Amino acid sequence: MGSIQREIRLESDRDPGFADEIRSMPGCEHLDRCIQCATCSGVCPLSVYMDHTPRRIMELTRDGFKDDVLRSNTIWLCASCYECQAECPMEVGVTDVMVALKNKAIASGVAPKDVPTPVLAREFFRMVRETGRVSEGKLVQRLYLKTGPAKFFGMIGLGRDLMRTGRFSLRSERMKRPEDLQRVLDGTPGVGK
Amino acid sequence: MKYAYYPGCSLKASGKAFEESLLAVCSALEIELAELDDWNCCGATAYMAVDETKGAALASRNLALAEQTGLDMAVPCAGCYGVLLKAQAMQRKYPRLADQVSVGLKAGGLTYGGRVRVKHPLEILAMDFGTKAFRSRVKVPLKGLRVACYYGCRLVRPESPFDDSHDPVTMDNLLKSVGARIVDYTLKSKCCGGSLTGTIPEVGQNLCYQLLKEAQRREADVVATACPLCQFNLECYQKDIARKYTDLKPIPVVYFTQLLGASLGLDPVALGFPRLIVPIEPILRERGIMAKAGTEPAKAGV
C-alpha cells in the first residue's frame, strides 16, 4: 500500500459570495437542489478525464471554493453535450453552471493559457467580432500558433484529405457588413470586446 | 412550403456536403429555403463560454432577421440549432437578460419579439413535409442498407421540441420509410466530443472511437448524422483514430440528407458524395442501390 494522503480544504479557502454570484447567472438558480447523487458524473462521457467530476463541481461551487473550481480542467473538458442536465433528477442546470464557470474563469483571467479549449473560445470570440463569421481554416491556424505549432504537422494527412474533397480553405468567410453585428455586440452589456 | 434558411459557418466550409444534399433534397420536394441576408455566426458553445449575454445577443440577431421574413427558420447545423433554441429559452425565462439583448439589438436597428419557430431539417422533412409524403417520392429504395442513426447531443438536448432527448427516433423512422434497415444503436445521442476532438485529441478521439466501434459491432454499413461537427469528427479523424485503435475498420459517415437524396434518385455529385473521405459508393453498389457502371467516383469542386 502506498502513502495515504488527503487534501484538506480550509474555511479560509472559501469565497462566501461565489455561490450567490453563480446562482444569479442564467440556468444556475437551482444549484442548491443538488442532492449529490452523481447521475451527472455517471452519464458524463468525459468525467473520467476530469480532475473534479461534475458532482464535485456542484458541491465545491455552492460551498464557495472558487479557486478549485475555476482552475479545474473540468470546465474545459466539458463539451456542453447537456447530458448531465437532461438526466439530472433534481433539474439542476449542471451544464449551464459549467458555462457560467467558464465565463467567470475567462473574465477573472484564471483560465489556463496553454490548454487549447479556452484559447479556442477566445480566438473564436475575436474572429466573430471581426468578420461576423467563423473561417474554420483560419481559426485552426490561429489555435495552433498559440498552443503549439508542432501539433500542426500531425494534421497534414487530414489537411490533404480536406483539400482533396474541397472542404478546407484559408479564405476568410465574412459578412457583407460586419459592422451591423458589431453594433449589436457593442450595444449589449457584457465583458467587452 | 418556404423557410428562412440559416446555414451557419460549417455548411459553407467543411460541411458543404450537408448544404449541397439538403438543398438538392428540398428542391426535389419543392421546399423553398431562402437564405437569410447577411446572417452572422450563431456563436456556438465557444462564444457563450466567454460571455453568455453577448452570446445570446449574437444568436438573437439571426432570430430577429428571420422574424422579419415571417417564416419558420430552417437550421441544419445541430450546433447552431441548439444555440438558437437556447437563446430563445434564456430570453423567455430571464427578463433581465432579454432586456440586455434587446438593448443590443436596438443598437443594431433590430427588434426580436420571440415569435420565430426554429426547426431542424429532420423535423421539417419528417413532420412538416411528412414521412408518408416522402415515401411516395422514393425512386431508389435503400433496400438492405444497414444504417446507424447518430443524432449527437445538441439536436435533442437539453430539450427537443420534436423528439426524445435520450432516445430520439425521427431519423430512424424517416430512413426506415425509404427502405433502409436501421440497426439498434444505443449510443445515438452520446456526445462526439465536439471541438475537443481537435483541441484535446486523446480525449475527443476516444469518444469518436467508441461511437464508431459500436456502429461496427452492430454491423452498420454506414453512420448517418445530422450535424456537421459530428460528421467531421467521425469521418475526418477516422484514419487517426484507426492508427491508435487498430480494431476499427473504415466506415462511411454521411449526412442523413445524402441518404434521403440517394433514395430520391438524385445525382451523387449534387448530393456531395465526392466530398466524403471514406466513400459511400462501394457499399451502395454492393447493395444494388447504385448502378455498378461508371465506377470512377466524381471529383469534388473546390
Image (spheres, coloured by chain):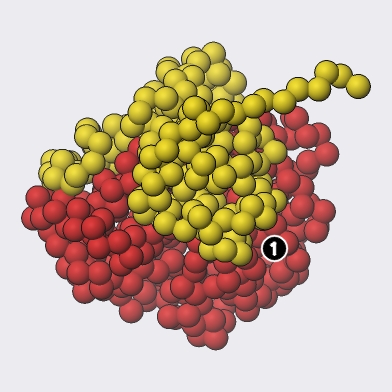
Q: Position of residue B104 (x, y in %)?
A: 16, 50
Image-quadrant location for residue B117: bottom left
Hey, which residue is sitting farthest right in the picture?
Answer: A1
Quadrant placement of the N terminus of chain A: top right
The residue depicted at 80 percent of the width and 57 percent of the height is B219
Hey, which residue is sitting farthest top in the picture?
Answer: A150
Q: Secondary structure at mark 1?
A: strand
The residue depicted at 14 percent of the width and 62 percent of the height is B111
Above or below residue A8? Residue A100 is below
The residue depicted at 19 percent of the width and 53 percent of the height is B100
Q: Colour of chain A?
A: yellow
Of the pair A41 and B216, the residue shown nearer to us: A41
Image-quadrant location for residue B247: top right
Q: Position of residue B301 (x, y in %)?
A: 43, 42
Of the pair B261 and A38, the residue shown nearer to us: A38
Type of residue at label 1? Val
Hey, which residue is sitting farthest front in the picture?
Answer: A11
* Number of numbered markers: 1
Q: Position of residue A24 (x, y in %)?
A: 35, 51
Q: Colour of chain B?
A: red
Of the pair B269 and B153, the residue shown nearer to us: B153
User: Label 1, on which residue?
Assistant: B147
Quadrant placement of the C terminus of chain A: top left
Q: Position of residue B114 (x, y in %)?
A: 25, 69
- Taking the image as drawn, is residue B24 in sight? no
Q: Rate crowding at label 1 as few (under 14), some (14 to 19) or many (20 or more) other CA atoms within 10 Å.
A: many
- Taking the image as drawn, is residue A94 in sight? yes
Q: Is residue A81 left or right of residue A17?
A: right
Above or below residue A80? Residue A10 is above
The residue depicted at 43 percent of the width and 44 percent of the height is A19
